[in-house]
């Protein structure tokens, strides 16, 4: 028996800010998908939830200051305090 299958391809044309498109494509890539797949995931969730879906976020990348703090921690270049007051005193506050 041969069954006919309907095509799954339908196009949507939208206008978006070029920077927004580039940012979204970068996040999609971090998530292991392309922009088309990301939009399809979003649309499927809209339908499933009958509204705006959950946030889909890529892992946050630490900024330079946080990366340095992580390196310092791993290198043992940190101080320990027993109380918040001790930490504030060390900071001169």
Image: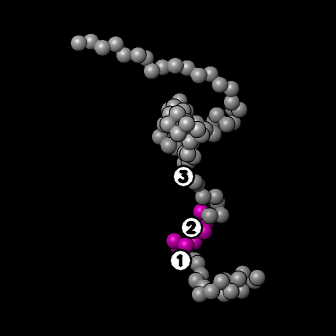
Q: Main secondary structure of the magenta part?
A: helix
Q: Does the rendering let one see residue 34?
A: no
Q: What residue span does the magenta drawing correspond to?
A: 67-75
Q: Is residue 71 magenta?
A: yes
Callout 3: few (<14), some (14-19), or many (20+) C-alpha neighbours within 10 Å?
Answer: few
The residue wearing badge 3 is 59
Q: Between marks 1 and 3, how big is the CA–CA gap?
A: 26 Å
The answer to whether 92 appears left or right of 83 in the picture is right
Identify the residue at image location x=41%, y=16%: 6
Quarter holding the N terminus is top left
Give residue 91's quadrant in the image. bottom right
Q: Between marks 2 and 3, how big is the CA–CA gap?
A: 16 Å
Q: Secondary structure at mark 3?
A: loop
Q: Is residue 57 above or below residue 47?
A: below
Q: Secondary structure at mark 2?
A: helix
**Spot occupied by residue 25 in the image (x, y as percentages of width and height):** 58, 36
**Spot occupied by residue 56 in the image (x, y as percentages of width and height):** 55, 45
Quarter holding the C terminus is bottom right
Callout 2: few (<14), some (14-19), or many (20+) C-alpha neighbours within 10 Å?
Answer: some
Which residue appears farthest toward the left when viewing the image? Answer: 1
Identify the residue at image location x=55%, y=45%: 54
Identify the residue at image location x=27%, y=12%: 2
Colour mapping: one colour
The residue wearing badge 2 is 70
Given this view, does label 2 or label 3 mark the residue nearer the observer?
Answer: 3
Which label sits on residue 76? 1
Q: Is residue 66 above or below residue 47?
A: below
Callout 1: few (<14), some (14-19), or many (20+) C-alpha neighbours within 10 Å?
Answer: few
Given this view, does label 1 or label 3 mark the residue nearer the observer?
Answer: 3
Identify the residue at image location x=58%, y=54%: 61
Relative to the observer, which residue lies in front, 9 or 79? 9
């Amino acid at each position: 028996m041969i069954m006919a299958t309907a095509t799954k391809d339908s196009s949507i044309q939208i206008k978006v800010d070029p920077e927004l498109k580039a940012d979204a494509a970068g996040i999609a890539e971090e998530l292991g998908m392309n922009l088309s797949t990301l939009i399809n995931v979003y649309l499927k969730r809209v339908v499933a939830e009958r509204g705006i879906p959950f946030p889909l976020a890529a892992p946050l990348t630490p900024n330079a200051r946080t990366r340095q703090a992580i390196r310092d921690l791993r290198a043992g270049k940190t101080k320990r305090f027993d109380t918040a007051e001790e930490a504030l005193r060390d900071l001169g506050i």
